[in-house]
Amino acid sequence: MYYIHIDCNSYFASCEIASRPELEGKAVVVANDNENGGGVILALNAEAKALGLTRGIPLFKVRKKLEAEHVEICTADHRKYRRISKEIMDGVVEQGIVQDFVQYSVDEFFGTLPLDDPDELRFYAAKVRDLIWENNHIAVGCGLSQSYTLAKVATHFAKRHKGYDGICILPPEKREKALALLAVGEVWGVGRQNRKHLESAGMRTALDLAKAPEAQIVKLLNTAGVHTWLELNGKPAVTLASHERQKSIMQSHTFAVMINEKEGLEEAVAGFASRCAAALRHQESLCSVVTVFVATNRYRDDLAQYRNKATCKLEKPSSDTSVIIKAATALLDTLYRQGYMYKQAGVVLSGIEPDEGHQLDLFSVENDERRQRLMSVADSINHKFGPDSITFGKH
């Protein structure tokens, strides 16, 4: 059996081009908004990258270049990206080739193929790749190997070398050669801080990590690091469920038009809190800590600057939208200052724990069950008709 990883190429930009075929072959960037001095490049296609543009650059810094090179600027539409992602998911499931197919993120998917022959693997992976292109006009990279992590390694090469035609199969006999070519910081599950620990211990490549003694990995990285180490050695150890249950959940936005009224900021924060709560329920978790942050536009030197955050602990862990909105808006009350033009705000949930077996208050069981049914109905409607089809007030 081989694990397969499917990663959409330049996903946000690809979605925009799929929606507007006239953009095909043109340089395209996707920005969070187009306000003068405010927008930041979130994604870009190969043609835009060839011009030297990169993610994270404020639009005002490259405005002249964008105009001179006739680069198309698209405003990010996350609802569209989620819809297309679901269409990809549904199409591959209906095709029936990939087994255990799951969505890992908006532009990444995992599954398995019960095959070992490289020619057969390539044949069926090509069918999946071609289906996504035909249905959604989204190009993807496919990696196949003996574990999820190695499949991600294979995708790394599939997307960077045209000779693979979007599909890289990494069998055991080629594993060490591939890992020797991959920087340790590029390994799935190795974050920035872990990369520093590994490099300070002399591990520069993925192969260095794979060949290190298990005891050293335990000391440097903890249990999750051991799972990565096992996977690099071809021994499946990662379950996607463990990755899906995030340790913190955040929703934030850089506003297209700056906000100075408290009511507008409160509406935005309530929306972020609502989506965070839905994500919390999706991974069957509860949170005990809520954080809210606000910030002005740091690129506007002509405006007064202010940024701050506040945190509170809930009376008991919860995934109830109303509880989380109430906590978030109360925090905003302590943060809001008149006289500032707010460019960004966000909500972060932490102190996350599984909701199974959670101790309920004896006198609130019935009410909790009623609230859970209400949340379930709201989630179902929002899933069917789109995010924010049903929203909650703060009380």
Image (cartoon, rainbow, N blue to C red):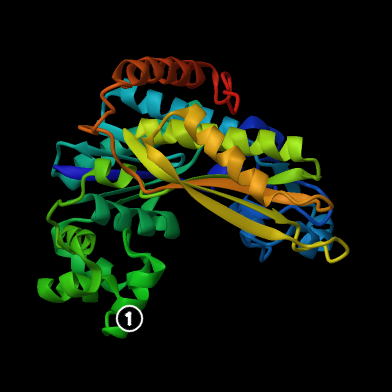
Judging depth in this view, the residue of 371 and 380 nearest the camera is 371
The front one of 259 and 50 is 259
Tell me which residue sits at (12%, 55%) in the image: 235
Question: Where the N terminus falls, by quadrant?
Answer: top left
Where is residue 91 shown, x and y percent of the image? 39, 24
Dividing the image into 4 quarters, which one contains the C terminus? top right
Could you tell me which secondary element the residue under label 1 belongs to? helix
Q: Quadrant of residue 200?
A: bottom left
148 and 271: which one is in front? 271
Bin the neighbour count of mark 1 within 10 Å (Cα to Cα): few under 14, some 14-19, many 20 and up.
some
- Tell whether 228 sits left or right of 40: left
> Does any portion of residue 89 appear in the rendered image?
yes
Question: Is residue 393 toward the left or the right of residue 248 in the image?
Answer: right
The amino acid marked with disc number 1 is Glu
The residue depicted at 78 percent of the width and 65 percent of the height is 61
Would you name the residue on which mark 1 appears? Answer: 199
